[in-house]
Image: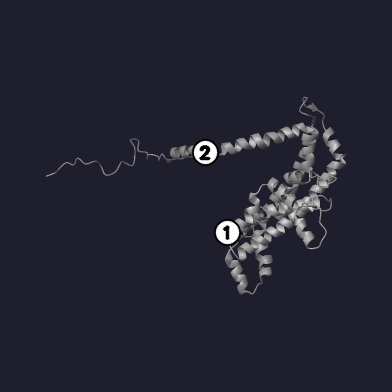
């Protein structure tokens, strides 16, 4: 006796009426997912892109245009072609400001890089305490203006505690910010004090990527700490160090606030760095066209220096396999 079953079939047919195998519909779902991810990514990027367009790209393009004009805010911009650039080439104050800026950059970068590298290596080789790293970073949490004012008080020739200590030790007081010989090195060291902790932590992060097995193997072979630093640390840290150097050089060329609150470009233009001269030309003498020309020149110089640094240091390559 045969009993009919009312249960549904255990599986669907593999072919349609025409005999063709049905195609999966995963592509349309995947395409829709990618479209949704793209829209979500665009939504997250939009605020940063808006800020870039409004506060970076548009002012840059506007500044390039103004560099070919005579503009003082009171009258419409008047096209003068290359006159501002010709004036800049023959302006002795511009070249003096550029020289002062280069002097500042060399002192700042040299001292800051060596000090930050030493601190980073000590943090990595001796202790990795989070508390100690926080202490190292503390000066960076202070703004440049506040740091400048604090050090202005400390180094004051008559009342500063720094000169009080120097006098108590039997030495003559030093006019750190009032002497043309001491002014730029002092400003450079003030900014080194503020930024060295941040730079050290960037290098410390790069050191964390170096495998400890390399140091252990070198110790087994009898290598000293100095030899391990030269043969292991420096070659493998090179990409991170290159990026840090590029960042610090760009930032050093843009020094302004420390000079503005301590020396105002003095004494006798000894600290009249390029950014301060640009600011004075624009907002002190209302020569916005000429100030824009100097800004464009600084942009070109920084672009060239960055390109050369990137190529010489091989920042995009790593020796870590």
Which quadrant does the C terminus fall into? bottom right
Q: Residues within 10 Å of mark 2 (few under 14, many from 20)?
A: few
Relative height, residue 72 to residue 176 (above, below): above
Which of the marked residues, 1 or 2, is nearer the chain's N terminus?
2
Residue 87, given in percent of the width and then of the height, sits at 86, 36
Which residue is the site of mark 2? 38
Q: Which residue is rendered at x = 77% and y = 54% of the image?
A: 107
Q: Secondary structure at mark 1?
A: helix
Residue 228, given in percent of the width and then of the height, sits at 66, 68
Q: Where on the picture, by quarter, is residue 166?
A: bottom right
Position of 51 with respect to 169 (left or right) is left
Position of 272 with respect to 200 (left or right) is right
Q: Which residue is rendered at x = 68% and y = 33% of the image?
A: 58
Return the residue nearer the eye: 28 or 161.
161
Q: Residues within 10 Å of mark 1 (few under 14, many from 20)?
A: few
Residue furthest to the left in view is 1
Residue 16, given in percent of the width and then of the height, sits at 34, 37
Relative height, residue 267 to residue 174 (above, below): above
Return the residue nearer the eye: 245 or 71.
71
Relative height, residue 25 to residue 310 (above, below): above
Q: Secondary structure at mark 2?
A: helix
Q: Which residue is rendered at x = 71% and y = 36% of the image?
A: 60
Q: Is residue 242 visible?
A: no
Mark-to-mark CA distance, 1 and 2: 41 Å
Return the residue nearer the eye: 74 or 14.
74
Which residue is the site of mark 1? 131
Which quadrant does the N terminus fall into? top left
Residue 304, given in percent of the width and then of the height, sits at 75, 46
Q: Which residue is rendered at x = 64% and y = 64% of the image?
A: 122
């Amino acid at each position: 006796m045969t009993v009919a079953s009312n249960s549904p079939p255990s599986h669907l047919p593999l072919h349609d009426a025409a005999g063709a195998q049905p195609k999966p519909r995963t592509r349309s779902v995947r395409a829709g997912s990618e479209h949704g991810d793209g829209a979500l990514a665009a939504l997250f990027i939009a605020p940063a892109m808006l800020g870039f367009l409004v506060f970076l790209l548009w002012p840059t393009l506007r500044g390039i245009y103004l560099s070919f004009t005579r503009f003082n805010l009171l009258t419409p911009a008047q096209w003068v072609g290359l006159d501002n650039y010709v004036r800049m080439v023959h302006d002795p104050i511009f070249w003096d400001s550029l020289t002062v800026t280069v002097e500042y950059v060399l002192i700042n970068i040299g001292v800051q890089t060596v000090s930050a590298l030493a601190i980073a290596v000590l943090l990595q080789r001796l202790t990795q305490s989070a508390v100690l790293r926080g202490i190292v970073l503390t000066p960076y949490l202070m703004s440049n203006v506040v740091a400048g004012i604090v050090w202005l008080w400390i180094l004051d020739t008559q009342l500063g505690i720094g000169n009080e200590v120097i006098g108590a030790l039997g030495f003559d007081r030093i006019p750190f910010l009032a002497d043309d010989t001491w002014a730029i090195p002092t400003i450079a060291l003030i900014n080194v004090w503020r930024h060295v902790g941040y730079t050290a932590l960037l290098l410390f992060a790069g050191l964390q990527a170096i495998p400890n097995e390399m140091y252990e193997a070198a110790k087994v072979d009898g290598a000293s700490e100095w030899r391990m630093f030269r043969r292991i640390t420096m070659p493998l840290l090179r990409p991170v160090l290159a990026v840090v150097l590029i960042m610090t050089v760009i930032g050093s060329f843009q020094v302004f606030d420390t000079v503005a609150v301590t020396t105002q470009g003095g004494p006798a233009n000894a600290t009249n760095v390029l950014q301060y001269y640009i600011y004075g030309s624009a907002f002190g003498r209302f020569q916005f066209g000429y100030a824009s020309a100097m800004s464009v020149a600084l942009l070109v110089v920084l672009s060239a220096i960055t390109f050369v640094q990137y190529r010489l240091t091989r920042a995009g390559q790593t020796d870590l396999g």
